Image (cartoon, rainbow, N blue to C red):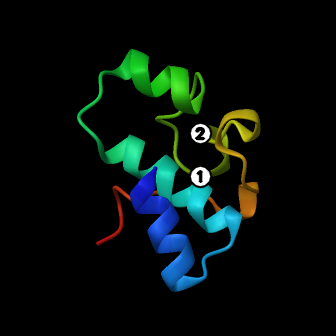
Amino acid sequence: MEEYSVAAHILKLPQSSLCELARNSVIQSGFEMEVKRHWLGQKWYLPGAAGNDINKASFEFTRVHDPLKEG
């Protein structure tokens, strides 16, 4: 969490960007599926809005993208 606080302060990121950054970090992590399901919701693995549980991720469906397909 400290890294996110520093990034938010230096880059002046809004709360929605921090939530998206944290969500993408969990998706790309080596955590087991059960851990990801706990933090991101039951369908975290689905692309786009279908995989976003607004109650877990705390940002709008319109901001959701698939970080694993980018790059």
In x, y percent, where is residue 41? 60, 27
Give the SS element for disc 2.
Answer: helix
**Which residue is label 1 attached to?**
48
Q: Which residue is mark 2?
A: 51
Q: Residue at x 55, y 72 (%)?
A: 8
Residue 15 is left or right of residue 33, and the answer is right
Q: Image point 68% across, 72% down: which residue? A: 14
Spot the residue most to the top: 34
Observer-nearest of 31 and 12? 12
x then y, percent, for residue 31 = 29, 28
Q: Amino acid at mark 2?
A: Gly
Q: Nearer the viewer, residue 48 or 17?
A: 17
Residue 32 or 12: which is nearer the viewer?
A: 12
Q: Residue furthest bottom?
A: 11
Horizontal side of residue 12 vs 10, given as left or right: right
Which sits in the foreground, 60 or 25? 25
65 with respect to 52 (left or right): left
Which amino acid type is shown beneath numbered disc 1?
Gly
SS for callout 1: helix
Q: How many marks?
A: 2
* Residue 47 spot, x, y in % from top left: 52, 47
Residue 28: x and y, percent? 31, 47
Q: Which mark is residue 21?
A: none
